[in-house]
Image (cartoon, rainbow, N blue to C red):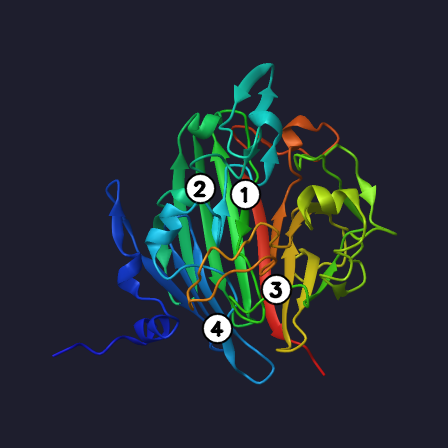
């Protein structure tokens, strides 16, 4: 007699996901799929392979739930494709010019994996390793890992812990902490690709975006910051008032050409803050469904990426292609290439210090 699936299994299977497709052993470490739930019916599924957020179901204004993050129906796709869907990124989110930096007069060469530069932690970053699961319950999971000295070229043995908490206020909270035994650089972030209409439901150019940032960091044609901090006023990068993501994409602008759209770090304003002291960094509205997403953080920057490198080649969980600009990412962070930019906030971590970072994605519906 076939066993009746648990509530968790039923909900996962209804989302085109089979838990068995995410269960394996990699280099002796077990990989599994975990589910977080809150009292409002929101569900998050996440694997300890790369801390990949596999699905995230949130309601629209009529109470209908959709999965709003891009991803695949099995682990094999995540392992075979070099992508960052839903992952925790480390040791360094974003780019480091030519994969080089110095600490106290010592030069370090990192893995090169983005033209001539280093991107998102290297060839085998935090998105491509198995994490330990320290604790898990219905609304929280705690991951940990030791990144060995010189992994992908980074100095120091790094002890990392990441906690995901799903609250009954419809917040997905991510807390990062880390310690090192040698001076190093660190910049952790989360890399879910969002489409508030539902994964695979066309472009996100019709989403309305507000970024709480009066300035951004322009880049060169390799997407490395020039070191300038530029005011957004009068540019396509002005999202201080809500506007359609696609509104200014066709404006003649060198920065848009370099990135084939938006793929830039925005310098966050210092207020307003929520009750936990985190700055409201962004707000997104999908007008048809009424779904909203707010981002809060204690980081000084946020990377807004508009899905410019999606091509339709990736087929997602529901069998639909992920088209050009079919998702957006909002990655809370320190600025790209900070180790080589003395005027940017430092990302250095020394022994005896504790790195901390917080990101909150809060979901809701637009009030009429």
Count numbered badges in the picture.
Answer: 4
Task: Tell me which label, 1 or 3, sits earlier in the chain.
Answer: 1
Badge number at residue 188: 1
Disc 3 crowd, CA 10 A, few/some/many (<14, 14-19, 20+) = many
Residue 64 horizontal side relative to residue 254, left or right: left
Can residue 73 be seen in the rendering of this structure? yes
- Residue linked to disc 2: 126
Disc 2 crowd, CA 10 A, few/some/many (<14, 14-19, 20+) = many
Badge number at residue 203: 3
Location of residue 333 (image quadrant): top right
| Position in image of residue 320 (x %, y %) | 46, 66
Give the alpha-carbon distance from disc 2 to disc 1, as whole Å. Answer: 9 Å
Between circles 2 and 1, the one closer to the viewer is: 2
Task: Tell me which label, 2 or 1, sits earlier in the chain.
Answer: 2
Residue 354 horizontal side relative to residue 5, left or right: right
Placement of 65 over or under 235, stated as above or below: below
Badge number at residue 42: 4
């Amino acid at each position: 007699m076939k066993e009746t699936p648990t509530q968790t299994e039923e909900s996962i299977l209804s989302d085109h996901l089979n838990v068995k497709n995410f269960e394996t052993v990699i280099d002796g470490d077990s990989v599994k799929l975990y589910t977080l739930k809150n009292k409002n019916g929101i569900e998050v599924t996440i694997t300890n392979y790369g801390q990949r957020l596999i699905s995230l179901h949130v309601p629209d204004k009529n109470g209908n739930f959709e999965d709003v993050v891009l991803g695949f129906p099995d682990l094999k796709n995540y392992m075979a494709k070099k992508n960052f869907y839903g992952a925790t990124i480390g040791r360094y989110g974003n780019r480091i010019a030519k994969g080089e930096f110095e600490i106290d007069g010592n030069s370090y060469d990192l893995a090169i994996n983005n033209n001539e530069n280093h991107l998102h932690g290297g060839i085998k970053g935090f998105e491509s390793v198995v994490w330990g699961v320290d604790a898990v319950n219905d609304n929280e999971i705690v991951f940990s890992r030791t990144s060995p000295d010189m992994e992908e070229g980074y100095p120091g043995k790094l002890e990392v812990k990441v906690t995901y908490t799903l609250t009954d206020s419809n917040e997905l909270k991510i807390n990062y902490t880390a310690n090192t035994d040698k001076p190093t650089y660190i910049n952790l972030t989360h890399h879910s690709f969002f489409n508030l209409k539902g994964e695979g439901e066309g472009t996100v150019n019709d989403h309305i975006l507000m970024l709480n940032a009066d300035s951004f960091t322009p880049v060169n044609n390799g997407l490395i910051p020039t070191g300038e901090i530029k005011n957004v006023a009068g540019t396509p990068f002005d999202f201080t008032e809500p506007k359609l993501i696609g509104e200014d994409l066709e404006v003649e602008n060198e920065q848009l050409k370099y990135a084939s759209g938006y793929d830039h770090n925005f310098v966050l304003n210092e207020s307003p803050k929520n009750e936990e002291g985190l700055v409201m960094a962004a707000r997104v509205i999908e007008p048809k469904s009424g779904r909203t997403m707010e981002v809060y953080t204690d980081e000084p920057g946020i990377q807004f990426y508009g899905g410019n490198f999606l091509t339709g080649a990736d087929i997602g969980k529901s069998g639909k292609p992920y088209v050009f600009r079919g998702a957006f990412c909002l990655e809370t962070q320190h600025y790209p290439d900070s180790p080589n930019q003395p005027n940017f906030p430092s990302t250095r971590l020394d022994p005896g210090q504790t790195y901390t970072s917080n990101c909150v994605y809060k979901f809701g519906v637009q009030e009429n």
